[in-house]
Amino acid sequence: MFFDLPRIAVIGGQSAGKSSLVEGVSGINVPRDSGTCTSRCPIECTMSSSSTSWSCSIALRIEYDPFGARLAASTTLAFGTEITDKAQVEIWLRRAQAAVLSPHLSPEDFYTKTEAELKHATATDDKMLTFSKNVVCVHVNDPDVTDLSFIDLPGLIQNSDPQAIDLVRDLVVSHIKGENTLILITIPMSDDLENQQAVVLARNEDPDGERTIGSASNTDIGILTKPDTLGTGDLGARRKWKDILDGRYSNIKHHLKHGYYCVRLPNDEERGNDISRVESNRLASEFFDSTSPWNEVAERNRFGIPNFVDDISRLLVKLIANNLPKLRQNVESLLHDCTRDLDALPPLPSRDPVTEILLRINEFCSEFAKAVHGEKHKHLVQASRERYAQFKTDILKTSPDFRPFVDHRHYRHPGSPDGEFTGTESAVPAKNLMDVREVIAKSIGWELPGHVPFEATKKLILEFTRLWRAPSLECFNDVFRFASNLLEELIPTHFGQFGSLEKYVRSLVRGQLERSKETGLLILNKMLDLESEPLFTQNSHYIQASEEKWLQFYQNQMSSKQTLSKDEYHNELVVMANVCAYFQVGYKRIIDYVPLTIEHELNQELASQLPKTLLLSLFEDPNATEKMKELLGEDPVLTAKRESLEDRRMRLLQIKEKLDGLKHTSV
């Protein structure tokens, strides 16, 4: 919730004399139309006596959308130019109020409208709001006023549609909440005190009467208006109000804490004659001094605008003084938070659009390239290495499960001669001597007796190496996903401040990702094709040594059982050994070349192609410079947040300046 200095909220029912009171205090004429509710939005009035001549300025503070929902950021717009003629204030206030009630139009549309045109728009424009929470701000420079700030709220209505009644009521309640608001209620003396809706609202918000001017323990009472409307025959009403002003109450609810104020304000004839403030105060003083029963009240300082303004000003200063340490602490805390939030926002670019975008693209591409080479964001390389280790295990699971027995159902996998394949559960069906013999038999052509056809060995080898493609592609897709995720993380970091640029770069990056994936898969599949026909290796010494080890290993397995003749199954054992030896050679190739292919043909190629893709797309446009200017437009949400924080910071600094000025003020 935003912090504000203590202020006065003026509330009251329709035709309670609130407009006349505002005029009497501020010295300016406000809009009024007999029999209608003229004020349809809050009017915040700040009076300053520091100037040597009179002037007035008006602004619109927009904090809510047309539906009454609070905006993410408020804006304050100057409305018109400085006013130096008091006679012009009323029409400019009418124009400002109409502008607030017409969010569908530009405020400038109302600068030249006459009073008749404004009334016609109110009656005919069905888009114009009935009431608005947005505020018309009036700053009056007048050497003859007392420094004071108050907000005049729309008069509470009773004879209207329920939606309008509730809207005004909620608007008033929202402004009188909080301990830093003094609630001032205007009550016409011609009405019954007990039936005042404003009194009920104030009592609900301030049950102990600490903040309401003229409040008691259970009843909130403000300033009494229209004493001149009581005729000589209104004896009961005159007696009631005199007793109240004298401090004699027939009801404890009327007990005063700060005291009542009674004012006599200019009537329509006097307003029409444009009497001065001095003359108005003189007439009021004469009225209270010469009219019974007001001239019989002992406390004369309770009558008239000057006495009321002096007392309310002192009360406001006292409230500020009592809360000064807490106010200063709150302001400092809010300033700190506001500055922190501003500093956390990405800085606005200080370079021209072309340079700014080129540098951001260079930093983005460089950061990804360093990640690919393991210099930054090491989680990419670490995740890839972990995935390659899993790939190695997946390839091991495709190793042949030869069991040198006639019936392998009762025998487990024998392992391997050097232990490399031991402990890895094979994912392929086991084969025994009879299975291998069957493969040999089906492969015999015109071979001479006793010769084992190479086709049998080739068939068995390809049966296993063809299983390598699926885990290779799965590994590729996972590493591709790692790289894609990192790029998605880096894009907002480098371009997120500018929504259009981020969206543009993301589209290009995703396009390049798909192209790199397609190219990488093509090369990987070609590499995997090498593990089909022909079966080939120049690592003759290694494969020969492996064959001998595997043959001896299987022979030892048969000997340990002492049930089969090695000579009878010699051909089968040789085929088993040859298949395992070749698998071992191919396995050592594939577990290195698949990761290397992915790294070189996917990640490194992607890192090298990204700068070309991004820069070429930008500069191939004949209007590249203009395009870059458009792309460098900051995200509207971020801009709104920045403006909101800047506005908050400015207001807090103003409040801090005011509080600092009260350091040596004595109350």
Image (cartoon, rainbow, N blue to C red):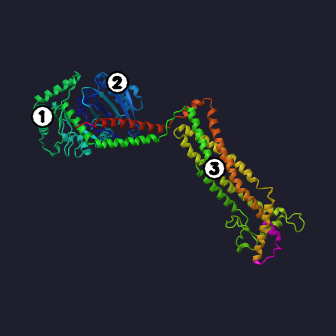
| SS at badge 3 | helix
Q: Disc 1 on helix, strand or loop?
A: loop
Q: CA distance from mark 3 to mark 1?
A: 92 Å
Kindly indicate the quadrant of the structure image that contains residue 17: top left
**Considering the image in quadrants, where does the C terminus appear?**
top left
| Residue 486 x/y as whole percent | 58, 48
Q: Residue at x 58, y 40 (%)?
A: 363
Q: Earlier in the sequence, mark 1 or mark 2?
A: 2
Q: CB atoms at circles 3 and 1 under 8 Å apart?
A: no
- Circle nearer the N terminus (3, 2): 2
Q: Which residue is mark 3?
A: 480
| Mark whose residue sits in front, 3 or 1 | 3
Query: In the image, 144: left or right of 293?
Result: right
Residue on which the image places disc 2: 82
Q: Which residue is mark 1?
A: 234
Distance Cα–Cα, label 3 vs label 2: 64 Å
Quadrant (top left, top right, bottom left, bottom right) of the N terminus: top left
Whether residues under marks 3 and 2 lie with C-beta atoms below 8 angstroms apart, the answer is no
Q: Position of residue 46 (x, y in %)?
A: 30, 31
Q: Between tags 1 and 2, which lies in front? A: 2
In the rendered image, residue 152, in percent from the top left (x then y), is placed at 28, 34
Whether residue 406 is visible to the viewer of this picture, yes or no, is: no
User: Residue at the spot x=16%, y=25% of the render?
Assistant: 282
Relative height, residue 204 to residue 26 (above, below): below
Label 2 sits on what residue type?
Glu
Q: Quadrant of residue 134?
A: top left
Q: Quadrant of residue 454?
A: bottom right
Q: Residues within 10 Å of mark 1 (few under 14, many from 20)?
A: few
Q: Is residue 327 left or right of residue 616?
A: left
Q: CA distance from mark 1 to mark 2?
A: 46 Å
Q: Which residues are magenta?
A: 561-577
